[in-house]
Image (cartoon, rainbow, N blue to C red):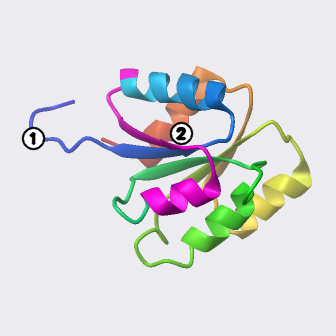
Amino acid sequence: MATGEKKKHILIVDDEEIWLSVISQYLKAQGYGVVTASSGADALSALKSFTPDLIMSDVRMPDMNGFEFVDTIKKRSATKATPVIFLSAIDDFDARRVARDIGAADYLVKPLDAADVGAILKKFLAR
């Protein structure tokens, strides 16, 4: 990262600790600031104190699924324009359609490929 360049911050939302850990470690190694949340409610709480440059969210979560979470944040002025990438084990046409319809920027299928994640970061967080 060049001197004077602002570090980009990413919010990761996933109810599975292993995914939070793996994705977080990868992003930190790439020089990104990372905040994690283990539920949609936790993520909404985190968004009260900071606005990320990108959000990565699981689809299936117990209290509030990823679609409900994103639908909520897309109605808020502070996060309306924040790109959201869904990360899900659900590789399904309907899930992808719903994600697109509620304003997700992209949809990646778990297990994640580092090259795909890198391409997403480059596309939405151009330095």
Frontmost residue, 87 versus 17: 17
Q: Can the viewer see residue 103?
A: no
Q: With respect to residue 112, does 71 lie above or below?
A: below
**Residue 31: in magenta span:** yes
Q: Quadrant of the C terminus?
A: top left
Frontmost residue, 105 versus 16: 16
Neighbour tally class for label 1: few under 14, some 14-19, many 20 plus, Cα within 10 Å: few
Residue 70 position, x and y percent, is 63, 64
Q: Amino acid at mark 2?
A: Ile
The residue indicated by pointer 1 is 4
The residue indicated by pointer 2 is 120
Total numbered labels placed on residues in the image: 2
Residue placed at 54% from the left, 25% from the top? Answer: 21
Residue placed at 44% from the left, 56% from the top? Answer: 46
Mark 2 falls on what kind of element?
helix
Residue placed at 67% from the left, 27% from the top? Answer: 112
Please provide the residue range marked out in magenta: 29-46
